[in-house]
Amino acid sequence: METTLTIESVLLALGLTLFAGMSTAIGSLMAFFTRATNTRFLSGALGLSAGVMIYVSFMEMIPEAIEKLNAVYAENEATIYMLLAFFGGMGLIALIDFLIPEDENPHEFHRVEKVGAKSEKLKRTGFMLALAIGIHNFPEGMATFISALDGLDVAIPIVIAIAIHNIPEGIAVSVPIYHATGNRRKALAYSIWTGLAEPIGALFGMAFLLPFWTPVVSALLLAAVAGIMVFISLDELLPGAEEYGHHHFSIGGVILGMMIMAISLLIL
């Protein structure tokens, strides 16, 4: 993987993060132009995202973090620092979950059909979901950006996985706003704004982390990002996939995601 940063690698990482974030707009458009949600597809896609993220965390990012830390610290010390960063990443995303009320928390999974049910609170629901998902996407943007800085072999599958799991979030934001206002443009705009939280998170990471970039910082961030992705997979993606009621599609997606990740790492 790359250890030297260049302007090209930073710009590429920002571009990939923007792509991942903007997939919320795809979800929004799907909500407008399809009468029914393909729950089998979403269940399998969420499972696939979880499989990719779990596999790359344990089989690529954590070993890479340990390797970089071993070059500076003794083996046991390097492992301790990696574990602190890994569980620190989990703690960060768990804290964000804790601070967001359950009803507006994107990790407290909302069925698309339930979100779209008409009520007097639809508009507020959509706005609060947009705010909550935007906050939740901020550290995801940093995670995507940091992984992209460390090489395309890991970055591309992660970006695709993040993009897939952002699609239902775009649906969840746009449906209530559209049904409350009848305005497709407004619903799409809020969906896009939630996605923009990811490149904003990437810019934040670039501004505050790149001046201090060293192999040790890179290793600790890789381990922290692995913790964030494992937490998202276990707390959001897998429960969300199961919520649609297609257990075998979700498990099949997990296995397929791991296989795709394994093959891509061998090829790249």
Image: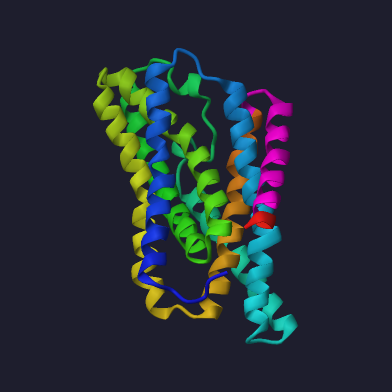
Q: Is residue 228 magenta?
A: no
Residue 11 in the image, given as x and y percentages of width and height: 36, 62
In the image, residue 71 lies at what x, y percent?
65, 84
Query: What quarter of the picture does the N terminus occupy?
Result: bottom right
Q: Nearer the viewer, residue 80 or 38?
A: 38
Q: Quadrant of residue 78?
A: bottom right
In the foreground, 126 or 221:
221
**Residue lying farthest to the front in this orientation:** 267
Which span is picked out in magenta? 243-264
Query: Relative to 128, is 215 above or below?
Result: below
With 260 as the anchor, is 12 left or right in this view? left
At 58% across and 41% down in the image, what residue appears?
A: 236
Q: Is residue 92 visible?
A: yes
Left or right: 193 as drawn, with respect to 43: left
Q: Is residue 185 above or below residue 94?
A: above
Q: Quadrant of residue 60?
A: bottom right
Name the quarter where the C terminus is drawn. Answer: bottom right
